[in-house]
Amino acid sequence: MSWRGFDEFWDPWREFARVERDMGRLFGVPGGVRSGSAPAVNVRADHDKVTVTAELPGVSLEDVDVSVVGRRLTIRGERRTSEPAAGGRYHRRERESGRFGRAVNLPYPVEVGAVTAGLKDGVLTVTLPRAQADRPRKITVQAA
Amino acid sequence: MTQTTTRDVTEAASGPERTHSGPTYVPPTDIYETETEIFVVADMPGVKPEGVTVELEGRTLTISGTPAEHGAVGGDAVRLEYRPGGYTRAFTVSDAIDREKIRASMRDGVLTLVLPKAAPAKTQRVHVQAG
């Protein structure tokens, strides 16, 4: 399955296009997504865990849904920006609101039951511990 | 009628020294006005309340945010799509602001500023007296 493996994972453009397609389908947005509805993510990994972060200012944890299926992490949610009081009028409106969603492939299988997510200062951090079965095993060499 | 305006200051050339490494962004901002107040709402993810500076100098309102040092997210970069950074933006406000009563709050990476309008200026009437 090498073609579904690292090659695709490392090709950002193909991934973007695919995510856009997926999200477009998911939310019924014709021809892809509006900017901002697919938040940018940073993915880091070491031997024990993958850490995914995304900037989601103004989003509360109960409005975010994080799920993992196989080696695919999906972040979905809704961002509500407060409406001005009656009679208020906008001078500028630049902040995105509405539903957002994003999917990323993970570099290795993770322990789905041990995934944690936290939102602090508008930054979502998802920590995904590596699956036990996938961890490098240390073999103790015994003297004969 | 009191015309309240807010607009970008185009060049922040003489801005303050940066106190963090990494990029400085212009935060996406909503500005709306009600009968009595002007609201400025800016997205600054990664900035804690203590990292925010709000200054009103003359008619220039400057907001800036310094990101908290990220508790070193460990591991090798697998995919990096954004760079955490600081924020700064300046606006020109009308001088009909009650400067003493400006309120600021920072929550979930969103800065909200409330600028109360000064009591509406009385229409100045000049009585022309018959000479």
Image (cartoon, grey):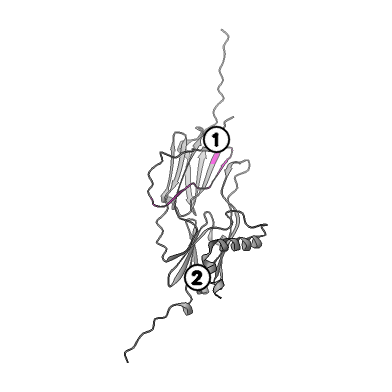
Q: Chain of mark 2?
A: A
- Residue shown at the point (47%, 34%) measured from the top left: B59
- Residue holding disc 1: B5
Q: Amino acid at mark 1?
A: Thr
Does dot 1 land on a helix, a strand or a loop?
A: loop
Residue A84: image x %, image y %?
Answer: 59, 45
- Residue holding disc 2: A107
Q: Residues within 10 Å of mark 2 (few under 14, many from 20)?
A: some
Q: Is residue A31 depicted above or below B14 in this figure?
A: below
Quadrant that contains the C terminus of chain A? bottom left
Please count the marks in the image: 2
Q: Is residue B28 magenta?
A: yes
Please give the range of residues in magenta: B20-38
Q: Are marks 2 and 1 in contact (CB under 8 Å)?
A: no
Instruction: Give whichever of A49, A61 is nearer the camera.
Output: A49
Q: Residues within 10 Å of mark 1 (few under 14, many from 20)?
A: some
Q: Is residue B25 magenta?
A: yes
Q: Is residue A136 depicted above or below A42 in this figure?
A: below
Q: Looking at the picture, do discs 2 and 1 lie on one chain?
A: no
Residue A80: image x %, image y %?
Answer: 59, 53
Q: Chain of mark 1?
A: B
The answer to whether residue A87 is visible is: yes
**Nearest-to-viewer mark from 2 and 1:** 2
Residue B69: image x %, image y %?
Answer: 39, 56
Q: Amino acid at mark 2?
A: Pro
Where on the picture, by quarter, is residue B5?
Answer: top right
Furthest-top residue in view?
B131
Question: Which mark identifies residue B75?
Answer: none
